[in-house]
Amino acid sequence: MPIRAAQASDLPQIVEIYNASIPGRMATADAEPVTVAAREPWFREFDPLTRPLWISVAPTGEIQGWLSLRSFYGRPAYRKTVEVGVYTAPAAQHRGIASALLAHALSSAPASGICTVLAFVFAHNVPSLRLFENAGFVRWGHLPGVAELDGIERDLDILGRRLA
């Protein structure tokens, strides 16, 4: 499956995939769909060389999934640390796309000067926890009850991996 840097023309499909994850209340703390216009400033924060946003493209040209590496905490001392986010289109789930995107990110990150990758995952999101654990991430923290979705308090796990 081809993986490439996202382009501005990909943003509608990226947002569609993200919005599809909201109703499940497992992958994001957003409770309502976001708009493409609202995501344009977010998209402009990415840089293919230092803070990439990659997409996996099906042979038909549709985006199957995407992965982002964003700056962590926004302070210079954390420049070698990123937060990873990965989302797969509903029709493409359970096909190894998220694993392929994550493997690509982990192998490419050192060339961008990245030494540490963090994942913030709801503790009830077992599929995502397994994805990251299978990629060598370890639980570095647990934040009990820090999110509330539909009146239910949710825990957040912080997973981390140091890169060689």
Image (tube, rainbow, N blue to C red):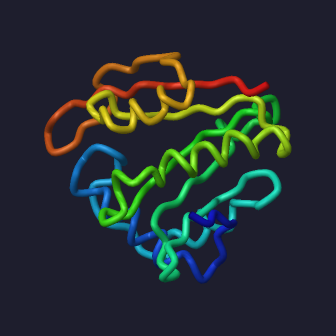
Q: Is residue 147 left or right of residue 141?
A: left
Q: Quadrant of the N terminus?
A: bottom right
At 50% across and 45% down in the image, what residue appears? 99
Comparing 125 with 153, the one in front is: 125
At 66% across and 75% down in the image, what residue appears? 7
Q: Residue 74, percent across and down?
A: 70, 41
Comparing 109 with 71, the one in front is: 109
Quadrant hosting residue 71: top right
Q: Residue 61, percent across and down?
A: 52, 81
9 is higher (above) or lower (below) than 66: below
Quadrant hosting residue 4: bottom right
Comparing 74 with 62, the one in front is: 62
Q: Residue 140, percent across and down?
A: 52, 16
Q: Is residue 111 left or right of residue 133?
A: right
At 58% across and 44% down in the image, what residue appears? 102
Total marks placed: 0
Comparing 37 with 156, the one in front is: 156
Q: Residue 44, percent across and down?
A: 68, 67
9 is higher (above) or lower (below) than 137: below
Q: Quadrant of the C terminus?
A: top right
At 27% across and 55% down in the image, what residue appears? 31
Among all residues in the image, which is located at the extreme left?
151
